[in-house]
Image (cartoon, rainbow, N blue to C red):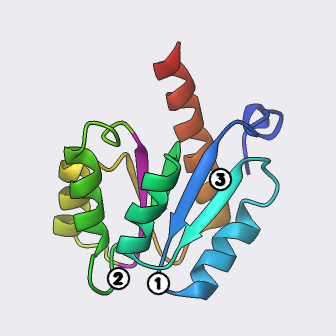
Amino acid sequence: MIPLYAQERDYSQYNVLAVDDIPINLLLVQKMLARYNFTLRTAVNGQQALDEVAKQKPDLILLDLMMPEIDGFEVIRRLKENPETADINIVILSALNSNEDIVKGFSLGANDFIMKPIIMERLLTCVTTQFQLIEAKNK
């Protein structure tokens, strides 16, 4: 169940980038988040994600870890080492769920970690919490 404060909020000012090399996963995330008014862009690999960030900096990135060529860990590393993108909130969405993977994601700078298969309520709560953190940081 999504908290009432999250259901009643206007998220239209936020820009979210979802990154996954499996198109059905992107569609699933889009459908889960359809009730919110924010702009949702997608990328199908790490390089495309970095290119999208360069075009328009998102407020939040929902990032898969296991992708060909540039994996999610490398995307996080590159974003966090760049002063222009270091403050972007990143939530990992991954089937990788070992303690080492979780710790590595957080140590690189991820803000949260959601294991696949994605539970809709967990994703919605996580996304709205990230928006609240962004708002608090901007005050």
N-term mark: 2 or 3: 2
- Name the residue rendered at 41%, 42% in the picture: 88
Q: Is residue 45 left or right of residue 7?
A: left
Give the residue pinned by disc 3. 124
| Type of the residue with mark 3 | Leu
Q: Nearer the viewer, residue 93 or 70?
A: 70
Q: Residues within 10 Å of mark 3 (few under 14, many from 20)?
A: many
- Name the residue rendered at 68%, 78% in the picture: 27
Query: Is any part of residue 63 visible from this angle?
Result: no
| Type of the residue with mark 1 | Asp
Q: Are marks 2 and 1 in contact (CB under 8 Å)?
A: yes
Question: Marks 3/1: CA distance?
Answer: 21 Å
- Name the residue rendered at 33%, 38% in the picture: 84
The image shows residue 84, relative to residue 49, as above or below, that is above
Give the residue pinned by disc 2. 67
Q: Residues within 10 Å of mark 1 (few under 14, many from 20)?
A: some
Q: Is residue 63 left or right of residue 30?
A: left
Q: Is residue 86 left or right of residue 49?
A: left
In this rendering, the label closer to the viewer, 3 or 1? 1
Question: Marks 2/1: CA distance?
Answer: 6 Å
Q: Secondary structure at mark 2?
A: loop
In this rendering, the label closer to the viewer, 2 or 3? 2
